[in-house]
Amino acid sequence: MRRPDSLPHDDRPTPETSAIPAASRRRRRRRTVALVAGGLVAALIATGAIAYAQLQGNVTTAPLADSGSNDDEALPTGELNVLLLGSDARALSTTDFGEDDGSERSDAMVLAHISSDSTRIDAVQLPRDTLVDLPACDDTGRGAYGGGRGMLNSALQYGPACSVAAVEQLSGVRIDHFIAMDFEGFIGVVDALGGIDVCLPEALQDGHARLDLPAGPQSIDGAQALALARTRHALAEESDIARLGHQQMVLSAVVQKATKSNVLVRPDRLFAFLDAITSSMTVDPGLGSLTDLGALAARVANVPTSAVTFVTMPTTEAPGDRNRVVPTPDADVVFRALRDDVPLVFTADADGTDAEQPDTTIRTTPVQIVNGADVAGLAGQVSEEAQAFGYVVSGLANAQTAATQTVIAAADTPDAQETARSLARELGIAVEVQVGDVDGVQLLLGADYRSLRMQAQESPAPSRPVDAVSRSADTDLCAP
């Protein structure tokens, strides 16, 4: 049976392929939610051991890594990276979403980064149609996979550990935990919240996704929320990228509703909410107890909704396949910000006004990279990184004699000087740009290169502005 929401190129692929000031109300709400989350276990025990046992028994776990090496690690006290997976498995209690054929993909993927001081959450949406080199995965209960070129979402067929490995390879971000949820689980969570409030600029109809919503502000239930997040046919582009804007709206609405005190302080709604969540999730062993889940909820509750940002990974059309996408150099900037635990900066603010634009000429001067550090393959590695940032590498070479210091030289032109300064800043090497008798820019990698990069990691540079679709979780849902 054909899936209700699909296009021809969506067929399941193989791995290859008030009177109180607003600020005070917000602070009080955050404190209330934090108290509820932080006192989760104690509250459950107070309601009875049966309730506690029921919720704990709901939790399903799966390995975080195919090696199992970091499955039992405790929640870090610093920065935390959690991969959220929306599974499209049809092994459900209903056939409304299609017949179960045993396959599974990630219908939605979000890499959520909680800052080390718990003041910021950056949630990066990873388009499921992203083409990547999938890493090999050992068998964690669903068979082994040898690796190969394919869509990012296909990794889930071999278990969450394979998705974790694929996203780590794509982003360079170490993932501490994962949370996976299927369609029925998402519907249950939204319904346990009493529905969510959204605002649509125009009416949307999609028979495939069973979506029929009018324009304007409205409250929708779990099934409608899922359909809104998944619809393609109601959109002019009918693409995975186009629907990510609706996913941002739905996720923002969930955050806004979940952080309202009248939802989480009522015992009946709290238990229903927790029951829906715990019965629908698969998590890694590090999140396998209610205590661990409560600790994570407490950290999340401490972050104001204004500091929760949803951003779509910047992509471009894949070469030779208009139905697939690949990351752009801006995607690497986004991932670097997560790795360095620094705030993201966008070329356009949430209200659509332009922020400071990066100079478009800073990457036009060709760069030659010379290996004087006597480290095999170093020039090639740095070249790949520079090209990922959008620089033009004109050539690689080995120095005739070993160099003790890293040097960046540039021709005596404004463009070359700016290219050299920008390259040093983005690579994280604190060296002065020298004017030299070179064509364009020359980067000489010396024996001190590794230590320079380590020093940069200790004091990471601010992120440069990136061009990406984003919104804050507290954004007015009716805002254009």
Image (cartoon, rainbow, N blue to C red):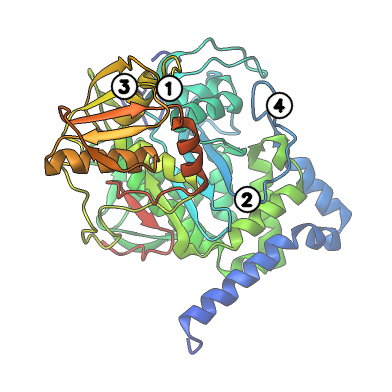
| Disc assigned to residue 370 | 3
Is tag 4's residue or tag 1's residue first in the polypeptide sequence?
4
User: Which quadrant would residue 265 be assigned to in this image?
Assistant: bottom right
Left or right of residue 441, residue 331 in this image: right
| Disc assigned to residue 343 | none
Locate residue 143, reporting x and y percent.
62, 13
**What's the CA distance linking mark 2 and mark 4?**
20 Å
In the image, is residue 415 above or below residue 273? above
Q: Determine whether the residue tagged by mark 4 lies in a helix, strand or loop.
A: loop
Labels 1 & 2 near each other (Cβ < 8 A): no
* Residue ID for mark 1: 373
Q: Which residue is more in the foreground, 270 or 374?
A: 374
> In the rendered structure, which amino acid carries the disc numbered 2?
Gly
**What's the CA distance linking mark 4 and mark 3?**
38 Å
> In the rendered structure, which amino acid carries the disc numbered 1?
Ala
Residue at 67% in and 46% down: 76
Outermost residue toward the bottom?
A: 19
Q: Quadrant of the C terminus?
A: bottom left
* Residue ID for mark 2: 78
Binning the other alpha carbons within 10 Å of mark 3 as few (below 14), some (14 to 19) or many (20 upward) gives many
Q: Which residue is more in the foreground, 114 or 475?
A: 114
Q: Quadrant of the N terminus?
A: top left
Is tag 2's residue or tag 4's residue first in the polypeptide sequence?
4
> In the rendered structure, which amino acid carries the disc numbered 4?
Ser
Q: Determine whether the residue tagged by mark 2 lies in a helix, strand or loop.
A: loop
Q: Of tags 2 and 4, which is closer to the observer?
A: 2
Left or right of residue 297, residue 395 in this image: left
**What's the CA distance linking mark 3 and mark 2?**
37 Å
Residue at 21% in and 58% down: 354
Asked whether residue 211 appears in the rendered view, the answer is: yes
**What's the CA distance linking mark 3 and mark 1?**
9 Å
| Disc assigned to residue 69 | 4
